[in-house]
Amino acid sequence: MARHDASRTPIFNGPAGWAAILPPTAARARLEGQAGCDIAIIGGGFAGLSAARRLKQIDPRLDIAILDAARISEGGTGRNSGFMIDLPHELTSGDYAGAGDSHDRQLTRLNRKAIDFASEAVQDYAIPEGYFQRTGKINAAASKPGIEGNIHYAAHLRELNEPHEMLDAQAMREITGSGYYQGGLYTPGTAMLQPAGYVQGLAAGLERDGVRIYENSPVLRIESGNGWSLATERGEIRAPKVIMANNGHLESFGFKRGRLMHVMLNACMTAELPPEAVRALGGQECWGATPADPMGTTVRRVGAAQGGNRIVIRQGGYYRPDMQTSAGDLARTVRAMRKKFDDRFPMLRGIRFEYSWSGHLCLSRNNVSVMRELETGLYAACVQNGLGTARGTLTGIGAAELAMGRQSDITAFFTAEAEPVRLPPHPFDTIGANAYMRWKEWQARLE
């Protein structure tokens, strides 16, 4: 017998902007009373939904239930920036380069499998094409260190024989409409998502395949004994096998304590740009730019097919082991993002932010995920290292395959990874991490 009680459940600050700009969807039922299924999944984000789809591919007869603490697309997925990146993209690196050529080539192949998996879901479930676009992305540079970082990363891409294109300031202005950037590094393999729209479409397709999804049903207790029992506030579901697809909240159930880093990031989304603002801005309708320095500012411009002509800007991370943020934290970072937005788009200085929110990243110091069997019949698809779209999809696929006794290059890759390394004891972890992040953000202030 094993019992794991949740020490906390997800708390969200601010609306999930990507969901807010889409047409409203009907609420799903909470879990109430007693129920049973073949496999229960905790979490209805990229990992949980991908796990359910892979399980149905392996055995369409499976009875699968998903329990999500919020509404589909209003938790972490609706707070994601929507970059489904194929190439090495380590947030703890100075220029995103990974652990070595062999490792990077292997992970790139797997990331592309995740993108193909998502593309097939778009086709199978008739998800609108605007919610998944293989348009590539830009590493935007606004300073000499940023340009040098891009040059170094481009050299790494040449070693990997990966296509890329260096962009000068004029090309960046033609794409973004902004004169802020001195250059960029374009890579074609990234798929750009409307993350809320994609997961809403994926969830609806899975329901047509017979998957049950319960919303606003945070799991409060996991207990073994003749299979597994998952208890919520109003109900209980029993299943022989369980997949935990709840990212950093894996630790909330007692797993990998003292090994996971919890970082809160913040984002703002403008009101829909009026026609005169669109004309003043110029540039392309849709593009996405990650910063040349990982601690810089991410910017996306989205169009009518994603929910309206808007700009999304994300920056301002802080370490929070309790996975919570406050209205004050968000207000401070919104003020900082206002300045960063105005610096990049002075022609849009009067455009207000319609939505602002906080989101949760879970990382390990050694950049490993937790995708393995934790206890008999209990599997994890967690710790996405800030790459919730591609890495979440991969770990969800892998956990589903492990649960069904399948082996693949995905299961081989993640089960061979080391354990997340231990962090310094609290409160030294928080003091050290936040001091380091403030220093790195200062270094990357122009990016």
Image (spheres, rainbow, N blue to C red):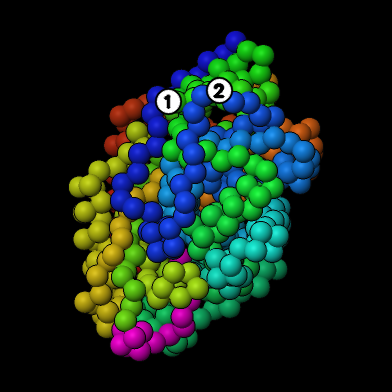
Q: Which residues are magenta?
A: 275-294
Which residue is found at the position 57% from the left and 14% from the top?
A: 2
Identify residue type, mark 1.
Glu
Check if residue 289 falls in the magenta segment: yes
Q: Is residue 325 left or right of residue 194?
A: left
Residue 281 is situated, as x and y percent measured from the top left of the image, at 35, 85
Residue 41: in sight, yes or no?
Answer: yes
Mark 2 residue element: strand
Q: Are marks 1 and 2 in contact (CB under 8 Å)?
A: no
Residue 187 is situated, as x and y percent measured from the top left of the image, at 59, 71
The residue mark sitting in front, 1 or 2, is 2
Front one among 4 and 427: 4
Q: Which residue is mark 2?
A: 34
Which residue is found at the position 67% from the left and 14% from the top?
A: 226
Q: Quadrant of the C terminus?
A: bottom left
Q: Which residue is mark 1?
A: 233
Q: Is residue 189 above or below residue 196?
A: below
Residue 329 is situated, as x and y percent measured from the top left of the image, at 24, 48
Residue 327 is situated, as x and y percent measured from the top left of the image, at 23, 47
Identify residue type, mark 2.
Gln
CA separation in Å, label 1 and label 2: 12 Å
Q: How packed is label 1: few (under 14 Cα within 10 Å), some, or many (20 or more)?
A: some
Residue that extends furthest to the top in the rendered view of this protein: 1
Q: Is residue 243 left or right of residue 273?
A: right
Mark 1 residue element: loop
